Structures are given as structure tokens and as C-alpha cells.
């Protein structure tokens, strides 16, 4: 099960974030109700600084955008293709350094942006909003943060439905499946649990999980039957779970 956000609901941690500087990666599955509006999707924020993934249905192409702001106007990386309404998509943002970052949708369509931005005051994870503004109308699932910059093949596997636990598990510092069994929603990596503000349970995207019993509350859910061999071989070199 996923979480439904209706424009007046969201999920937030309690003033704690697993990463505070580059490099890192954000990933999340989402489904938006429309392609006409701007929605906040997944963010690490502070009093003046921000790393934020947002859905830009209000601009041409309807891209996933990764906004990085250090006090001022900031910079934006936008995916080269856009999202569709009422369709599950995977969004990913990779912050490689203070001058190099990318946005992806469904494992590809990489869009890059430079510019020096080094947010330093970010101290909270928020999903579906930024401080109650620009709230998502749609669904979210499988929110994850790595304290490293995933490469393009790894992002591609996430977009095909591979569980975040398979990708660089030693660097996975936040993972909230958002399956609707817990309140607050649990982060199974670092116990940075998410406070629920008005959300309800909805259908989950199809995923490939580790075998049942390895992690609490997940496992044994079917997903896509095959992955491209080259991508899978690349990921196996990074993940012990894929060699089991």
C-alpha cells in the first residue's frame, strides 16, 4: 500500500535529516492527479536552504525538477521528459557536488544543471510539501535517501521497480516504504520516522523486494519479471542482496 496525499496532507520527519551535504541521492515513486500544477514531492529543507524534488505540471513538458537553493533563487535541474497524470512514476535526484546535480524520471531522461549552491541549514525531510505549501495531490511510495551519488545504471534499476534495499545498501541512510501499516510511517534504516498529516492508504506500485523476513513489514511482493542483464550485473557488484 502507498500513501494518498490530497492537497491538505503530507509526511514529515521531526527535525532530523540523514544527509546535510553532497554527495547524496533522493528517490521516490509518485502518482500525480494532474499535469497542470506545481507540486512538492520530496525535500530536505532548513530555515533558508533547500534540496527539493518537485513536479512542474505548470511548465512545458511537465518535468521532474530538482531545486537546490542556498538562501537565494538557486538552480534547477529538469528531467528531459515529463510525467503523466494518474500514472506511477519514479523520480530521482542526484547531488554529486555543490556544482553538479541531475534530475531523472523513470530511471532516465537525465537533466543536469551546474551553478554553485551549498545549502548548509537543511534539517528536516518532508514528503508532499514544503512547510504545508504546494502540497501534492496524488500518491507516494518508496522514499529513499543514499549518502552517495548513484550512477545512471543504478537509477535506471530503481525506475524499473527494484527496491532501494538492493542498491548500495551500505549507503542507504533513509528508506520509508510507505506501505501504510505503521503510524508514524517507519524509516527502516535510521528510525527517522515520518509523522502523518492527514494521509490515507492507497495501492502501491509494483516492486521487487528482498525475500520475506529480511526486513520488517516488506518482502515477497512481485514486480517486473526481468531486468536488462548489463544493468543487473552492474548493480550486483555494489549489493550483497543481489548476490543471494
Image: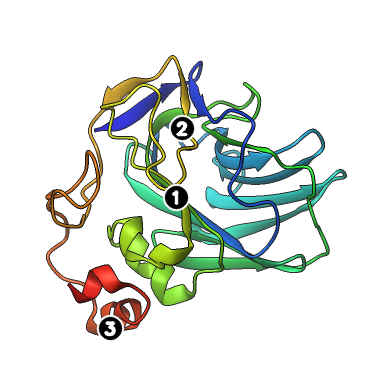
Residue 48 is marked as none
How far separated are the C-alphas under marks 2 and 3? 33 Å
Mark 2 or mark 1: whose residue is earlier in sequence: 1
How far separated are the C-alphas under marks 3 and 1? 22 Å
Above or below, 40 relative to 202:
below
- Label 3, on which residue? 233
Going 60% across and 51% down the picture, which residue do you hit? 65
Secondary structure, mark 1, is: strand
Above or below, 90 relative to 58:
below
Q: Position of residue 160 (x, y in %)?
A: 29, 62
Going 33% across and 36% down the picture, which residue do you hit? 86
Secondary structure, mark 3, is: helix
CA neighbours of label 2 inside 10 A, class few (<14), some (14 to 19), many (20+): many
- Label 2, on which residue? 193
CA neighbours of label 1 inside 10 A, class few (<14), some (14 to 19), many (20+): many
Q: Quadrant of the C terminus?
A: bottom left
Mark 3 or mark 1: whose residue is earlier in sequence: 1
Q: Position of residue 200 (x, y in %)?
A: 33, 19
- Label 1, on which residue? 144
Q: Quadrant of residue 107?
A: bottom left
Going 39% across and 59% down the picture, which residue do you hit? 106
CB contact under 8 Å: marks 3 and 1: no
State left or right for residue 196 relative to residue 20. left
Secondary structure, mark 2, is: loop
Residue 112 in sight in this render: yes
CA neighbours of label 3 inside 10 A, class few (<14), some (14 to 19), many (20+): some
| Front tag of 2 and 3 | 2
Amino acid at each position: 500500500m502507498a500513501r494518498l496525499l490530497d492537497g491538505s496532507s503530507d509526511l514529515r520527519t521531526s527535525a532530523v535529516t540523514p544527509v546535510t551535504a553532497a554527495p547524496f541521492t533522493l528517490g521516490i515513486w509518485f502518482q500525480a492527479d494532474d499535469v497542470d500544477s506545481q507540486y512538492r514531492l520530496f525535500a530536505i529543507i532548513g530555515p533558508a536552504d533547500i534540496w527539493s524534488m518537485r513536479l512542474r505540471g505548470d511548465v512545458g513538458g511537465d518535468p521532474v525538477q530538482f531545486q537546490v537553493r542556498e538562501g537565494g533563487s538557486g538552480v534547477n535541474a529538469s528531467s528531459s521528459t515529463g510525467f503523466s497524470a494518474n500514472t506511477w512514476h519514479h523520480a530521482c535526484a542526484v547531488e554529486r557536488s555543490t556544482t553538479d546535480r541531475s534530475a531523472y524520471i523513470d530511471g532516465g531522461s537525465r537533466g543536469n544543471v551546474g551553478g554553485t549552491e551549498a545549502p548548509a541549514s537543511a534539517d528536516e525531510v518532508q514528503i508532499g510539501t514544503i512547510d504545508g505549501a504546494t502540497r501534492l495531490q496524488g500518491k507516494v511510495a518508496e522514499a529513499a535517501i543514499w549518502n552517495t551519488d548513484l550512477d545512471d545504471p543504478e537509477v535506471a534499476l530503481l525506475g524499473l521497480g527494484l527496491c532501494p534495499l538492493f542498491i548500495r545498501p551500505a549507503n542507504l541512510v533513509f528508506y520509508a516504504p510507505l506501505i501504510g501499516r505503521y503510524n508514524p510511517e517507519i524509516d527502516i534504516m535510521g528510525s527517522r520516522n515520518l509523522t502523518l498529516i492527514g494521509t490515507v492508504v492507497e495501492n502501491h506500485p509494483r516492486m521487487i523486494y528482498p525475500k520475506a523476513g529480511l526486513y520488517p513489514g516488506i518482502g515477497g511482493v512481485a514486480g517486473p519479471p526481468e531486468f536488462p542483464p548489463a544493468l543487473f550485473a552492474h548493480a550486483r557488484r555494489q549489493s550483497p542482496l543481489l548476490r543471494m
